Image: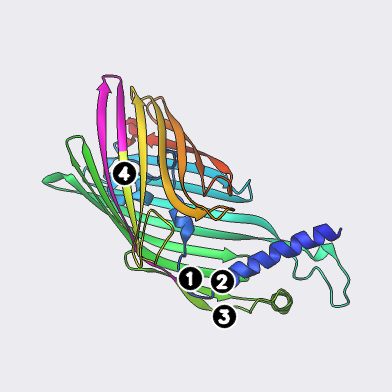
Amino acid sequence: MQKQIKTVIVAFSTLFFAIESSSNTPVHSNEFMYIGVGARALGMSNAFVAISDDVTSGYWNPAGLTNIESNIQISLMHSQYFSGLASYDYGAVSFNSDEYSSFAISYLRFGVDDIPNTSELIGSDGSINYDRIRSFSAADNGFLLSYARILPGLENMKLGANAKVIRRTAGSFASAWGFGIDIGAQYSYNDWMFGFSGKDITTTFNAWSYDLDDSMKEAFKLTGNEIPDNSTEITLPRFIIGSARNINIHENFSILMSLDMMITTDGKRNVLIKSDPFSIEPSFGTEFNYRDFVFFRCGAGNIQQYHNSKGEKIRSFQPNMGVGVIIRDNLTIDYALTNVGESSIAPYSNVFSLRLNIDQKDRDN
């Protein structure tokens, strides 16, 4: 019984600490928007800015939406992190308005559900009543409205942009709204592809507001946390430069290699090239294509340096892998085995995604 009480109190105290931390302008915010979407890209370690060519381009590089051949394309993805404690979901739909222009709507959610609210567990007289325990969700939501266009007369050049809305909540007592803009471009030359993506180029602002009752304020005091005030946090711009090349080995076999360099502007990070305020994080991915039917993918990224228990400096990286299969001509199933961090800390996650093409002309006939 005492163990159960400690468990729920620790869980609730941890959430309080997270909420309180958001009351100070953090160095990093809205990190859930940078996990990645689509098992194909995740299997290639997110090296996807130059080669994005489906509905997930609304997330990776909106310019890539112009590469979609079907009039309507839909993608869905689900994965779980931290041994199922957190769920990550994604859905998107794209439309080709004409031969030069495309639109997309994307939605992302990273959340922890059924968190016990223990603020009323112990009554004023010291009694414990489990009936007073309620549950809530802490969720981060992202909405993207994307537009992309091929430049007439310069078909190798494609441009795109996103309008982004962020909604973050912790039950009914803490919430934030945020707004931002992303831009993207792609250029192709023979078998070479180049991409550029600017995330949060205007700086994304999240405005937090809190609605705490007396019992929750008392819980803050008992756990040694300050009662948070309404505040604002910011997400500084980051830029991704990518290049890729497709190599035809045989009439039935080809290899696509991709390299991305992500440049962050929010201070020194533990990445391969680190400085203040700019740090550069590379990622590399490869896709083996057999007859445009079966795909095997692998990649490496998240290169970091840390000290082990002996005080020795160790360099680590995150390997990813995945497979994809095209079923008929309109349905693709992708799988990725990926990781949210160093494998000794966080378990690997299985990610599945579906992509469905709907050709408007064929449907109308």
**Helix, strand, or loop for circle 2?**
helix
For the residues labelled 4 and 3, say whether their Cβ atoms are less than 8 Å apart.
no
Residue that appears at 80% across and 66% down: 132
Residue in the image at 88% along x and 77% along y: 125
Measured as percent of width and height from the top left, residue 85 is found at 64, 50
Image vertical order of residue 336 relative to residue 196, above or below: above
Q: Quadrant of residue 295?
A: top left
Q: Earlier in the sequence, mark 3 or mark 1?
A: 1
Q: Is residue 276 left or right of residue 213?
A: left
For the point 62% across and 76% down, which residue is it?
Answer: 211
- The percent position of residue 93, horizontal first and vertical second, equals 40, 46
Q: Secondary structure at mark 4?
A: strand
- Magenta extent: 234-257
Circle nearer the viewer, 4 or 2: 4
Q: CA distance from mark 2 to mark 1?
A: 8 Å
Which three-letter amino acid code belongs to the residue tagged 3? Answer: Asp
- Residue at which label 3 appears: 229
Crowding at dot 2, Cα within 10 Å, few <14 / some 14-19 / many 20+, comes out as: some
Report the amino acid beneath label 1. Pro
Residue tagged by mark 2?
Answer: 21
Crowding near the residue tagged with mark 1, few <14, some 14–19, many ≥20 C-alpha atoms within 10 Å = few
Q: CA distance from mark 3 to mark 2?
A: 11 Å
Q: Label 3 to label 1, Cα distance in Å? A: 15 Å
- State the SS at label 1: loop
Tell me, yes or no, whether the highlighted magenta stretch contains residue 188: no
Cα–Cα span, label 4 and label 3: 43 Å
Q: Which residue occupies 66% across, 76% down?
A: 225
